[in-house]
Image (cartoon, grey):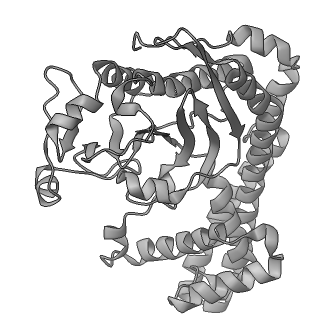
Amino acid sequence: MSSAHRIDAPDFDTVWDGLGLDEQALSARTRGAGMGGPVGCLLGVGAILGILGFFLGVLAAAIDGTVGVLVIVPSLILLVGCVILAFRRMSAARNHYGETVATPMLQQLLDGMAAQDRADGSELRLQARYEMDGRLDRGLLRESGLFFDTRMPQEDVVTGRFGRTEFVLADLKWQSAEDPRQSTSGGSAEQSAMSRHRERALIRRDLDTDAMDRDAVRQEIDRRASGSGSRLPFADVIGDAVSAQASKLEEQAALLTPSLIVFSADFHKDFTSTTRFLPEQRTRGLEGMDRESAHAAGFVPLDLAGLDLPRGVHGWTTDPAEAHYLLSPQLILALNEFSRRVDTDAIGVSFVGSRMTVAVGADEDLFSLDPANPDIRETSRTIYDDLIRFLSLVEHFDLNTRIWSKR
């Protein structure tokens, strides 16, 4: 942490006790959200029967196509139906946790965070709001140069101002990111089918579903997908109803997948250079940059004078002098600490235009309910502490120094 300011945040136990939650009821609902309990067991059995029926139908189709279709269709409907119901249960538990726990807890944290201004001793209050289903501007993601697919699903968005610095934080779901190089290289029929399925889900997310009725949304999806020759696998067999349910399943499932946390701060001071820290290869939604691609883009290596970045991450800049002015050892140490906390080397940082953007890809869903952990209090404490760590990144910069001054 920089000595310029010291973050003060409300104590977790004080905030938690103030919520007045029934922890046993919350834990019970969490256990029932997954595949546990009688309903979960029935859904699991149904899914297994659907898989077995599908493969038996494929074998039967080799002998008699009609018999094969008669077995495949109900098996797929059973399988998709059970999986959809399971994800709906988990999604309902997630929404309940977000409304009753995460939103009030995190808003109390945001309302209570403050720091001391080194220049005049005044208190800097954090002014921010939390939206479980908020959205981060895709233009910001594109301009950072850190992501190879800016259409990833989003949740847990925090927007606000700390002192004079505006910032936004969001949880992107990197498993839904599509590498454009793979999508244009042909690939197997299975990969092409998965790509077409993903395309329809992305089209659905792009539409303003609040302003359109279901039939209009469905027609628009079909119109856009048919323009590129897209059809879901088995669409001719199982019908549009199952196709639509499969798209909804993908949307629900995407929000339960691992996190790519993005933190971006606008310092209202244009940088004359571009500086990026990236892995050598694309990973967890992050763009890759090796020596060859960096050289082609006009970047040179950035020497950090003894400071170690996470393994496999390298610094590149168009102006080494300004890059050293922008960076602080405390920021590098903070990134390493968070990298160890979530056990990842997928770290990206960029200084472009007037913004600093930090992205950390993990193998877990960092800010959401964990159905596998019945201890709601400790799960919430981890979310609480992780949010403080990320929001504290802005304090690694002295808000009153010349480089961050307002225009």
Residue 343 location, x and y as percent? 40, 28
Kindly indicate the quadrant of the structure image that contains residue 333.
top left
Where 28 sits versus 181, above or below? Answer: above
Q: 159 and 151: which one is in front?
A: 159
Tell me the quadrant of the picture where the C terminus can be found.
top left
The answer, for residue 31, to whether it is visible in the render is no
Residue 35 location, x and y as percent? 73, 42
Q: 55 and 242: which one is in front?
A: 242
In the image, what residue occupies the spot 53% across and 27% down? 391
In the image, what residue occupies the spot 88% across and 24% down? 25
Using residue 347 as the reference point, say whether residue 47 is left or right of it.
right
In the image, what residue occupies the spot 43% across and 76% down? 192
Tell me the quadrant of the picture where the N terminus can be found.
top left
Kindly indicate the quadrant of the structure image that contains residue 315.
top left
Where 169 sits versus 199, above or below? Answer: above
Using residue 308 as the reference point, say whether residue 122 is left or right of it.
right
Q: How many marks?
A: 0
Where 64 sits versus 383, above or below? Answer: below
Residue 97 location, x and y as percent? 78, 34
Residue 185 location, x and y as percent? 30, 76
In the image, what residue occupies the spot 46% across and 58% down? 177
The answer, for residue 378, to whether it is visible in the render is yes
Where 400 sits versus 77, above or below? Answer: above
Using residue 191 as the reference point, say whether residue 115 is left or right of it.
right
